[in-house]
Image (cartoon, helix red, strand yellow):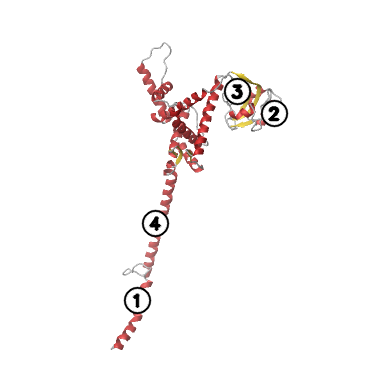
Amino acid sequence: MALARLSGRFRDAPGRAGRRRRSRSRSGDEPPVAGATPGERRERRRRYWSVGIGVFLLAVIFGVVLFGYYREFYSPPRVWAGSVNNIEFTMGDLVQRIRVLQGVNRYEGGRVDLSTVPFEYLQNLINAEILRQEAPGLGIKPTGEIIESALRRQFQPTAQEGQEVDPGQLEREFQNNYQIFLTATGLTDSEYRVILEEDLTRAGLAAMLSQGIESPQEQVEVRWIRMPIDPTEAGASDLQPHQVGQRLEVEDFETVAREVSRSAGYADASGYVGWVPKGAFPELDPLIYGDAELGRVALAPGEISEPEYVREGIYIVEVLSGPQEQELDDRMGIKLTLELAQNWQDEALQEGTSNGTVKMNFNSRLYEWVADQVFVTAPRVPAGGQPGQ
């Protein structure tokens, strides 16, 4: 009996092993379906794989779209653009500020060059914040009353001398003029008051710095020919700077200036500027006054310079006389004041950058994003200040 049970156990072993092999062979397949042929089971497997691949591809596409949206629309506005003493600006803040100033410029008949403006406006934002934080210590913080007064000087009509005017009518005209301006530029009252406050603060800084300007002071009498750096700029001459210099060798300076020069507001049609103090045009000082560190010798009276390339244009300068002690005229006094204010801001920015209290974050991708956003949503205000239809 024992032998029979043992022989039976050996006889059953192949059957059990076969069942295990068949079970393993079916482990990677779907559970058998009653009544399904092998071909039907293969078709089901292909459908399962097709659905799985489709779901995977859809997930990849959705992920790419979601990442693109995050990268282009959600993330950039929240990326910090700069900070002053832990007061941060985002790229969204920068876009908003450019739109505000773009609306003001467009209303006044100007335009914004988006190839250069984003970084310049970021610097302006930083400079404005530096000055805002420093203003109380300098004693030049504009009050709400000063801002309101400046606003009314800009938009409230003035009565003619001897004319009786209803105060209520003046108030209505002020509100109407101001509302037309806000509508045309796409600004809110609070946004424009911020801009006005910054302008008044800069004006206060300039007034404070102007107190240190001496008069009389040493000046040089000059005239010059100014040509735009961009040859496509309106009014630019077809002549190259060296060709203008060649003409000056055989023609009168005034004649060439009347034909070629494009004034930036300081020279008349003949190119005559007048008495220029040192510092009024810092980039031209090496020509007019010389610069020992740069090895530049000042032009002698009657001497005409080679073309000098600076940010404001290409200049060919002739010194007429000087240096001499001269009273400062209003134009040069204002120009000196503006330069002093700009120097103050440049030095404050440099100092803050050096000690880590001022930081900026900008690159080509963010630059392109800012420019695109401003272009797409720019207020469509025709030149002259009338809202578009």
Q: Quadrant of residue 20?
A: bottom left
Badge number at residue 19: 1
| Count of numbered circles on the image | 4
Quote the CA–CA distance across marks 1 and 4: 36 Å
Q: Quick one: which residue is furthest to the right in this view?
A: 250
Quote the CA–CA distance across marks 2 and 3: 26 Å
Q: What kind of residue is marked 2?
A: Gln
Badge number at residue 342: none
Q: What kind of residue is marked 4?
A: Val
For label 2, the residue is: 246
Q: What kind of residue is marked 1?
A: Arg
Quote the CA–CA distance across marks 1 and 2: 105 Å
Badge 3 density bin: few <14, some 14–19, many ≥20, Cα 10 Å: many
Residue 242 in the image: state x and y as whole percent: 67, 31
Q: Looking at the image, which residue is at 34% across and 76% down? A: 19
Q: Nearer the viewer, residue 356 or 2?
A: 356
For label 4, the residue is: 55
Residue 284 in the image: state x and y as whole percent: 61, 28
Quote the CA–CA distance across marks 2 and 4: 74 Å
Badge number at residue 276: 3
Eye-nearest disc, 1 or 3: 3
SS under mark 3: strand
Mark before the other along the chain sequence, 2 or 4: 4
Quote the CA–CA distance across marks 1 and 3: 107 Å
Mark before the other along the chain sequence, 1 or 3: 1
Position of 156 compared to 246: left or right? left
